[in-house]
Image (cartoon, rainbow, N blue to C red):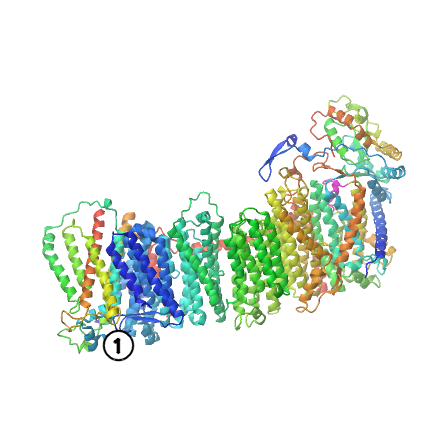
């Protein structure tokens, strides 16, 4: 597929939609969390206000070049992840740059932002940032293993690494979703998904009271604004990824909204019920429960 | 031509004659002595050259009657050579001992002369009783020479020697008497015809003769007396016993071997092997230099004894094998004993004194390498041929034992060498060297070098070797006094020119690895410009390693390959040991390399069974034991790729090496193992044991290596060690990829090899530059260096992005191909480990960059400067290549793919411009680069515009819970960075393998210590050993 | 006890080896070919030595004899070197005087013994005996003289010169054999004479004289050296 | 005759070796060695024996012509002569060594001379 | 702690001695700057956002902090007004001085305040921040907060109830929306005066003058 100017426009459109969706999702989820706690909760558009406020801050300090670049890395990672996936199945407009690479690219591109953020956070010189990064990376290595195995099982199942093809294979009724055709892989991946979303019980990385929100502790003003944009885009992109892999993708925006919302609710529910794990606990947990399930998935696929 | 008898008349006559001179003039007597020996040597030499050029053997009849009625002497090729050696040793030893002899008076010169004379006769005589007589002369001569120093120890040793040889001589006499009774003659040739071995008593008589000769060669375990002599005697005398006397006795054994049936020869072989292994085993525990040399001597003689026993199987190569090993032993052992006399200290650790005179160290190194059998020394050829022949004749146990024995020898010799190069020498006295002591050592070093090259030129198999690189090394050695920049330029030019000349011949893998080795070598050498001074001894060693590496590329035969392999090992050993605190690491590197080399040798040997050529492609048509050949060679190569279990040498060796050596030994040297594996797999294809695919095991090994390496790297505090473990891990990926035996697997492996070369050079140079500036390797002692070394930071940043395999940089390509390969192949569980390893790589990548560059700058580093320009230059050259490969991935992958296409036609990537397509997915590196770059630039520009007025603050301006940080040390979170991770998974990196090797080493030492207790120093025990040896061997034979 | 039983076992093992040899030893009913050659008439007459053992020792196996002589020479040298002390150290202790009987008898016997030794040497090629035996007898005479007179000091210088000269002469005669006769140590450089007469057997008597001189002086030297050391105790 | 001497010789050899192996005093060890040596010489001479033979000396009893039938083998005699001299040399040397050892340590116990070992 | 801020001499890797003045070397010595409001239209919009996104620093300086907790509970639920708590001063925009302020805490408060980004707002909670309240004659408590920091809103009471707090925040919002929340600029303009006041009460001044 050729790379044309229209792709940039399409990409901007996707980013715009997903950004708004992500922000609203964020607001709504927080609202839901509040309602569960019998609070009224924030206004659904509060994330917008927060971002605007942060950009409206007049002063900024900088700890150095990497500190400056880190949010850029982070946002690039988020947007890139989104753009390397077909967002809406069958839509040329919302397939964006998925012709540039396949599932492997997407899996690895997640780390682009993570690494950049870690670097910037560390440049701040704040020990809490470094502690947060240490925890974060440790946890990533743990949940990435069952995730990888699950993805391999899926790729093996569909004999392709092309996300579009994976989605295509799941068309034709919800029974042909990976969720039902390959339940073990789905379970393993969905467990890993919990880690990937970084919500409780795997939120020791941020631990606001212990290491004031960990890696981004020194970020503020516009820098924080960029990170907030990413916090809208990145989880949404991840949701889209998991939706594509496991739940048949989406052929239209409403379908996408419904599916991703429900997937997000999975992590919200777990996070609401379970308290926080220590890092070593979560590492062990990922390497015991989801990994075992992933291995079962592989065995089932292979034999 | 002068009759050989005059060797005897001259020496003996002179001996008698200088008795007349007595106190007249010691100088004249000494001169006469040397002249007589020199004359004798000249006679031997003239005969040797004459016989070599076709003259007939010379026979000397005494008393005017023909043999067998009178005693006759024979001067054949062997006799001429051995007498030449004896007289050479005699002359050099005479020069060496000149002072002692003069001090002790004329008697000692007489004894010395008579001793040399008797050895000549022993070699030449064809009459067994005459042999007995002159053996006694030699024994008594040694008994006299041992006490040259008149020390108490020497006296005890001499007494033991006398009793032992007395008993042996008695047994010999009984044997001779009955041989005479049964055969009716004393002449060896006639006895041979009399075939008395056809009945039991006759064979017992011959047995007694032979066993006595063997006992004179000090077989294990009946050799305590001999070792005590080596220890107690003046080293000059030790040299004579070890070099001259042993050569003579060996020749006697060879001479008499015609008398015995083949079953005897087998026993001789067994005894020889037992001696070789046994005495080398005991040598491990020795700390006394002379005694150690004694064990080593006895071991070598044991090997030669075994070779004599193996003569029927060695065929036409027997002479080459025996002579080359003998000559190596001869020169090296004599030289070592003489060196020992110069050093005067007996404790091995005190040999650090040698450093005071670097040329002595060079000599010492030459001797050690000659003994172990490194090229270009003669024993290398000998060992090669020996192993080949043994494999050919299916003597696998012997082959194994010889290799084990050689390895054991390597342990203590290289430890010793390490001591002398690296041991603390603070309290050692100054070393004084007299001309007469140094000349023989130098000459024997030249002798062993020269003979090695001579053997190389006359041997068919070695004729194709290229010596030009070696000459270049010699040139570098000559100009060693010049400053670094001159030598560096010469070296780079040399490599460049060589690459230019061989470039047209390179293709395929050879091209890729040739470029890694040579172009990579030039690149890392560029970094060498940052050094000042002369950097003595560095460049010849570097070139030695590169010569070996290029030899691997150019090799067409297994022999050439092994030759190059050993050169490379030798060069890299010295490079590694140049580092600080690298004594033990260099030793373990050497031992693993040695073991690996021996496995390779054995593998080549087995591969060669039933083949007539030595070409490398015989591996493709191995006749028998193919899986075994494969496993041996693979393990051999894996010692270099540092796969799990064989990796323990690597971290220390790489971490302690010098700044610009680390990339050489890590980024380049390890690829030699990869290249070996590729050659092996290319030629041998898939291998199965039963129905089990060996490659599956390799995949597991690769995967486990990757996880262990990366996990270990994540827990290191030492930056260079971290990089070293990262190499271990990365080589695990490569092995994993290779084990797939598919297009994609190999594509991944080869491209990862190239990439690994690039980023590891980059990182080692970068970290080296930092270490050079901050003088520590502990990462937690650094921090915040980004402000001081921004350029280094950028290269490390790029390096770790490549390691981590994060798109858009080129490291991702390898990962992507690996995924596709896995899906195609279906080995999921090892693959899972590999992917896990890939993620663990993030941990150490981040740690490396965070703890060094980010966080808090330390007090002492506030004025640190950027790394030297010459270290940065190669980094940025590599960086440019990395960016090129990242933006245009097919510039790297397409040629490799094309190269692999004929080997693995199926499953190749399909290229559409920069878009790669596999059966499963697709990847367009260029577009990714553009997209990511585009987004990045846009976001960056926006952010920069937004925050253009940002206030720059300093490192303690952080929101620190309303407090302010006090010290950078306590504010920089770096030590034990992944503590929670260690808590969770630390058990995976418990040093099981290190413990295994440690306990293996302790076990060997313990056995060594137990075994050597049999030598309790009591002469009666020794006599008992001798008699028991006879009885036991008798019982075995009859 | 355990150690000794091991030793016993090994010696029993040796006994087994030796008994096999003895078992197969049948004695000789006729000479083997080598001995027959030596005892053939023409060969006896070629060497012309009545004492066939001497013929073998000095002619056929002359080279062995050279080695033998060398051994003695070597031993003497080693002892000379080994026991050598600086002159200042050689302080003599009082030794007990020898008995009158010994002194008296030695005065008579020593010359007779030397004479006998010379006789044995000179007749080595005719009757049992020869250079070694004669030399040993002469040395015994020296021992006797020494016993009789512990203070006696040998003239080592003289012995050394004798030793060396006779050694060199032996070697030179051997070389002469190459030049003038069939080979090294061929004693036919002198006319053979007739079997059984004193002047016969070529150079054998001459060689025996050198050997005798050498052996005598060497053994005397050894004894003398030992005596010196003994006195130092 | 020859059997007796040969067996005697071998017994002496073993006896001598026993002495060498078991005696603690160096002088006794040397004596043992001498016995061993003597035994060897006897064995050597026994080999030469020709049944009914006489000494290999040409004199009135043995004519030149009949030497080949009458005399015993002269070779072992020559050999034994050499062996004796060698034995003498070795023994002398041993004694000198013993002397020196005694001077060094003032003892002749063989166990005390094991400074060199292992 | 104090010791660590004295000058010290270290040895560089090259072996040369190097004098370190931690206060100078490790802390930025740039004065706070005045950031003038931008274009009025944009500023109006920005002020609306600022007012509706009050990020309160989670720093309880005194006993009044206990009254802030109920704001997070379902009963009062300050979140619905856009009020949230942030753990780091870098990201917070509202600093609530909750009750009495001891001199020792003042040091931390000053430091924290200076680390917040412009625009930033200070809420004095309780009588103690106004006139010292029941601690008016304490030896180690300050009496008037606005001598040390520019206060935007005072909430009187001892203790003020959460309802009062909510009211106070509403007042603050009004102030911000009207563009009067320029405390940060005021602090920068009269920096010397504030600093002098601070130094007057903080006897052992052992930190840099400018806390970024």
The residue stretch that appears in magenta: A203-219
Label 1 Cα neighbours within 10 Å, binned few <14 / some 14-19 / many ≥20: few
Residue B591 visible in the snapshot: no
Tell me residue B813's x, y (percent). 71, 58
Q: Residue furthest top?
A: E137
Question: Is A301 left, or right, of B869 in this rendering?
Answer: right
Residue C184 visible in the snapshot: yes
Q: Secondary structure at mark 1?
A: helix
Q: Quadrant of residue E5?
A: top right
Tell me residue B15's x, y (percent). 27, 59
Seen in the picture, residue B667 relative to E155 is either above or below; the reply is below
Q: Label 1 marks which chain's residue?
A: C
* B395 vs A10, nearest the viewer: A10
Question: Is E107 left, or right, of C218 in this rendering?
Answer: right
* B447 vs B747, nearest the viewer: B447
Q: Quadrant of residue C26?
A: bottom left
| Number of callouts | 1
Q: Which residue is at a point 62% across and 48% down the rendered structure image?
A: B870
Q: Which residue is at a point 73% across and 43% down the rendered structure image?
A: A65
Residue B9 falls inside the magenta stretch = no
* B774 vs D51, nearest the viewer: B774
- What residue is shown with label 1? C33
Q: Quadrant of the C terminus of chain B?
A: bottom left
Magenta residues, dominant SS class: loop
Q: Quadrant of residue B318?
A: bottom left
Question: Is C106 left, or right, of B709 in this rendering?
Answer: left
* B580 vs B232, nearest the viewer: B580
Tell me residue B36's x, y (percent). 31, 60
Residue A206 falls inside the magenta stretch = yes
Tell me residue C186's x, y (percent). 24, 70
């Amino acid at each position: 597929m050729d790379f044309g100017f229209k792709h940039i426009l399409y990409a901007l459109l996707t980013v715009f939609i997903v950004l708004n969706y992500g922000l609203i999702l964020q607001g709504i989820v927080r609202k839901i969390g509040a309602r569960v706690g019998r609070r009224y909760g924030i206004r659904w558009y509060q994330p917008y206000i927060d971002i605007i406020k942060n950009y409206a801050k007049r002063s900024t300090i900088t700890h150095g070049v990497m500190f400056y670049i880190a949010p850029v890395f982070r946002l690039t990672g988020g947007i890139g992840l989104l753009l390397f996936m077909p967002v809406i199945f069958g839509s040329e407009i919302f397939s964006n740059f998925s012709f540039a690479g396949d599932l492997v690219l997407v899996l690895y591109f997640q780390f682009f932002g993570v690494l950049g953020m870690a670097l910037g956070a560390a440049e701040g010189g704040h020990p809490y940032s470094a502690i947060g990064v240490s925890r974060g990376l440790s946890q990533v290595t743990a949940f990435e293993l069952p995730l990888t195995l699950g993805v391999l099982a899926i790729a093996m199942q569909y004999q392709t690494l092309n996300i579009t093809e994976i989605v295509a294979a799941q068309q034709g009724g919800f029974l042909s979703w990976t969720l039902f055709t390959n339940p073990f892989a789905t379970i393993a991946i969905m467990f890993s998904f919990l880690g990937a979303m970084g919500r409780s019980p795997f939120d020791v990385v941020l631990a606001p009271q212990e290491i004031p929100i960990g890696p981004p502790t020194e970020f503020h003003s516009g820098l924080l604004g960029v990170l907030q944009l990413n916090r809208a885009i990145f989880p949404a992109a991840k949701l889209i990824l998991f939706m594509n892999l496991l739940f048949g993708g989406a052929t239209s925006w409403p379908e996408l909204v419904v599916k991703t919302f429900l997937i997000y609710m999975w992590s919200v529910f777990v996070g609401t019920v379970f308290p926080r794990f220590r890092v070593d606990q979560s590492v062990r947990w990922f390497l015991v429960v989801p990994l075992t399930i992933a291995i079962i998935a592989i065995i089932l696929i292979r034999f | 031509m002068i009759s050989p008898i005059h060797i005897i008349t001259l020496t003996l006559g002179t001996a008698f004659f200088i008795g007349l001179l007595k106190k007249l003039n010691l100088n004249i007597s000494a001169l006469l002595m040397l002249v007589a020996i020199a004359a004798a040597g000249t006679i031997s030499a003239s005969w040797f050259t004459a016989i070599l050029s076709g003259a007939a053997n010379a026979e000397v009849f005494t008393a005017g009657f023909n043999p067998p009625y009178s005693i006759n002497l024979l001067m054949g090729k062997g006799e001429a050579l051995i007498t030449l050696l004896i007289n050479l040793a005699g002359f050099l030893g005479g020069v060496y001992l000149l002072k002692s002899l003069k001090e002790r008076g004329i008697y000692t010169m007489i004894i010395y002369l008579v001793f040399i004379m008797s050895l000549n006769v022993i070699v030449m005589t064809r009459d067994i009783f005459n042999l007995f007589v002159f053996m006694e002369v030699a024994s008594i001569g040694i008994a006299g020479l041992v006490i040259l120093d008149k020390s108490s120890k020497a006296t005890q040793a001499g007494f033991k020697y006398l009793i032992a040889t007395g008993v042996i001589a008695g047994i010999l006499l009984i044997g001779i008497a009955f041989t005479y009774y049964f055969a009716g003659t004393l002449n060896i040739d006639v006895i041979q015809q009399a075939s008395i071995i056809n009945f039991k008593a006759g064979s017992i008589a011959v047995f007694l003769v032979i066993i006595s000769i063997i006992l004179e060669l000090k077989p294990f375990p009946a050799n305590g007396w001999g070792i005590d002599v080596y220890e107690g005697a003046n080293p000059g005398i030790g040299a004579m016993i070890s070099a001259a006397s042993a050569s003579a006795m060996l020749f006697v054994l060879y001479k008499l071997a015609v008398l015995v049936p083949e079953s005897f020869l087998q026993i001789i072989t067994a005894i020889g092997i037992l001696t070789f292994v046994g005495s080398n085993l005991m040598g491990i525990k020795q700390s006394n230099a002379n005694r150690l040399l004694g064990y080593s001597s006895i071991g070598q003689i044991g090997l030669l004894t075994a070779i004599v026993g193996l003569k029927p199987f060695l065929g036409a190569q027997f002479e080459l094998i025996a002579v080359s090993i003998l000559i190596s032993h001869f020169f090296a052992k004599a030289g070592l004993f003489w060196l020992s006399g110069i050093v005067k200290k007996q404790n091995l650790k005190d040999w650090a004194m040698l450093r005071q005179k670097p040329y002595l160290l060079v000599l010492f190194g030459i001797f050690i390498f000659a003994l172990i059998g490194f090229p270009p020394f003669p024993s290398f050829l000998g060992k090669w041929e020996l192993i080949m022949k043994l494999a050919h004749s299916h003597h696998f146990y012997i082959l194994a034992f010889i290799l084990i024995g050689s390895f054991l020898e390597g342990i203590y010799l290289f430890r010793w060498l390490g001591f002398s190069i690296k041991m603390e020498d603070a309290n050692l006295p100054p070393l004084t060297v007299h001309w007469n002591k140094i000349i023989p050592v130098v000459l024997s070093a030249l002798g062993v070098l020269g003979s090695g090259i001579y053997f190389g030129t006359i041997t068919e198999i070695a004729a194709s070797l290229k010596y030009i690189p070696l000459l270049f090394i010699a040139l570098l050695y000559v100009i060693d006094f010049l400053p670094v920049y001159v030598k560096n330029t010469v070296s780079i030019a040399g490599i460049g020119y060589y690459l230019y000349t061989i470039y047209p011949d390179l293709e395929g893998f050879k091209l890729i690895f040739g470029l890694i080795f040579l172009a990579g070598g030039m690149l890392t050498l560029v970094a060498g410009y940052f050094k000042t001074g002369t950097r003595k001894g560095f460049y010849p060693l570097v070139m030695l390693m590169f010569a070996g590496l290029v030899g691997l590329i150019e090799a067409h035969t297994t022999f050439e390959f092994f030759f190059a392999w050993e050169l490379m090992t030798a060069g890299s050993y010295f490079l590694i040991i140049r580092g600080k605190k690298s004594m033990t690491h260099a030793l373990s590197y050497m031992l693993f390399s040695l073991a690996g080399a021996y496995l390779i040798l054995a593998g080549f040997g087995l591969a060669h069974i039933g083949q007539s050529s030595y070409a490398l492609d015989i591996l493709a048509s191995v006749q028998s034991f193919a899986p075994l050949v494969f496993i041996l060679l693979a393990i051999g190569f894996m010692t270099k790729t540092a796969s799990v279990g064989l990796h323990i040498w690597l971290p220390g060796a790489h971490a302690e090496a010098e700044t610009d050596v680390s990339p050489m030994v890590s980024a380049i040297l390890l690829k030699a193992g990869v290249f070996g594996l590729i050659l092996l797999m290319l030629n041998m294809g898939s291998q199965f044991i039963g129905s089990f695919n060996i490659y599956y095991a390799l995949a597991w090994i690769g995967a486990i290596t990757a996880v262990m390496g990366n996990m270990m790297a994540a827990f290191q505090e030492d930056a260079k060690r971290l990089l070293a473990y990262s190499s271990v891990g990365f080589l695990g990926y490569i092995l994993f990829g290779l084990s797939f035996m598919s297009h994609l697997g190999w594509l991944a492996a080869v491209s990862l090899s190239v990439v690994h070369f690039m980023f590891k050079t980059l990182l080692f140079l970068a970290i080296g530059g930092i270490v050079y500036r901050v003088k520590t390797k502990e990462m937690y002692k650094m921090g915040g260096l980004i402000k001081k070394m921004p350029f280094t930071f950028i290269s490390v940043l790029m390096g770790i992005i490549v390691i981590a395999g994060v798109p858009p940089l080129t490291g991702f390509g390898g990962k992507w191909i690996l995924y596709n390969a896995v899906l195609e192949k279906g080995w999921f569980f090892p693959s899972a480990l590999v992917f896990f390893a890939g993620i663990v790589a993030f941990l150490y990548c981040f740690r490396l960059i965070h703890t060094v560059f980010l966080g808090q700058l330390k007090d002492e580093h506030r004025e640190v400067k950027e790394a030297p320009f010459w270290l940065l230059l190669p980094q940025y050259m590599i960086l440019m290549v990395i960016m090129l490969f990242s933006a245009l991935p097919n510039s790297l992958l397409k040629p490799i793919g094309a190269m692999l296409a004929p080997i693995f036609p199926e499953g190749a990537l399909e290229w559409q411009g920069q878009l790669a397509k596999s059966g499963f997915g697709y990847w367009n590196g260029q577009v990714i680069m553009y997209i990511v770059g585009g987004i990045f630039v846009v976001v960056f520009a926006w952010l920069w515009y937004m925050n253009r007025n940002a206030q720059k603050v300093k490192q303690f301006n952080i929101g620190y819970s309303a407090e302010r940080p006090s010290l950078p040390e306590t504010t920089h979170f770096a030590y034990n960075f992944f503590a929670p991770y260690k808590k969770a998974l630390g058990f995976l990196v418990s040093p099981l393998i290190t413990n295994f090797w440690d306990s293996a080493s302790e076990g060997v030492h313990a056995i060594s210590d137990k075994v050597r207790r049999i030598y309790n120093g009591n002469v009666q025990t020794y006599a008992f050993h001798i008699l028991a040896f006879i009885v036991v061997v008798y019982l075995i034979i009859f | 006890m355990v150690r000794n039983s091991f030793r016993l076992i090994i010696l029993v093992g040796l006994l087994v080896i030796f008994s096999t040899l003895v078992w197969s030893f049948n004695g000789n009913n006729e000479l083997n070919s080598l001995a027959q050659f030596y005892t053939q008439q023409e060969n006896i007459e070629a060497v012309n030595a009545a004492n066939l053992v001497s013929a073998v020792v000095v002619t056929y196996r002359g080279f062995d004899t050279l080695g033998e002589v060398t051994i003695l020479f070597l031993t003497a040298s080693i002892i000379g070197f080994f026991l050598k002390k600086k002159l200042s150290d050689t302080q003599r202790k009082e030794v007990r005087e020898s008995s009158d009987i010994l002194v008296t008898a030695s005065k008579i016997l020593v010359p007779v013994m030397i004479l006998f030794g010379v006789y044995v040497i000179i007749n080595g090629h005719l009757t049992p005996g020869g250079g070694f035996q004669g030399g040993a007898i002469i040395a015994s005479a020296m021992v006797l003289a020494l016993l009789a007179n512990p203070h006696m000091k040998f003239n080592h210088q003289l012995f050394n010169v004798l030793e060396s000269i006779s050694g060199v002469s032996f070697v030179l005669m051997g070389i002469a054999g190459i030049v003038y006769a069939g080979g090294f140590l061929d004693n036919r450089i002198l006319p053979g004479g007739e079997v059984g007469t004193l002047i016969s057997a070529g150079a054998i008597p001459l060689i025996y004289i050198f050997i005798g001189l050498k052996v005598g002086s060497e053994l005397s030297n050894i004894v003398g050296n030992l005596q010196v050391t003994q006195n130092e105790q | 005759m020859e059997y007796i001497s040969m067996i005697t010789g071998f017994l002496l050899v073993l006896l001598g070796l026993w002495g060498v192996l078991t005696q603690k005093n160096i002088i006794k060890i040397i004596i043992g060695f001498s016995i061993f040596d003597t035994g060897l010489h006897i064995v050597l001479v026994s080999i030469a024996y020709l049944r009914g033979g006489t000494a290999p000396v040409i004199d009135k009893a043995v004519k030149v012509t009949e030497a080949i039938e009458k005399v015993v083998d002269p070779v072992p005699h020559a050999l034994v002569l050499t062996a004796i001299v060698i034995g003498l040399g070795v023994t002398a040397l041993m004694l000198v060594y013993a002397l020196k050892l005694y001077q060094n340590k003032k003892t002749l116990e063989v166990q005390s001379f094991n400074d060199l070992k292992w | 702690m104090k010791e660590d801020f004295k000058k010290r001499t270290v040895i560089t890797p090259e072996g040369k001695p190097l004098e370190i003045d931690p206060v100078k070397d490790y802390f930025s010595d740039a004065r706070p700057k005045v950031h003038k409001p931008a274009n009025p239209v944009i500023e109006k919009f920005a002020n609306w956002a600022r007012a509706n996104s009050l990020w309160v620093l989670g720093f309880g300086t005194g006993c009044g902090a206990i009254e802030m907790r109920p704001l997070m509970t379902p009963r009062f639920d300050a979140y619905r007004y856009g009020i949230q708590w942030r753990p780091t001063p870098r990201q917070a925009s509202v600093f609530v001085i909750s009750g009495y302020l001891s001199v020792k805490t003042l040091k931390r408060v000053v430091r924290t305040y200076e680390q917040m980004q412009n625009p930033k707002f200070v809420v004095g909670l309780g009588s103690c921040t106004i006139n010292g309240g029941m601690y008016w004659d304490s030896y180690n408590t300050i009496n008037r907060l606005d001598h040390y920091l520019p206060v935007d809103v005072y909430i009187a009471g001892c203790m003020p109830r959460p309802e009062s707090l909510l009211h106070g925040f509403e007042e603050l919002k009004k102030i911000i929306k009207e563009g009067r929340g320029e405390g940060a600029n005021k602090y920068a303009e009269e920096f010397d005066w504030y600093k002098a006041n601070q130094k007057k009460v903080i006897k052992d001044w052992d930190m840099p003058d400018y806390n970024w």
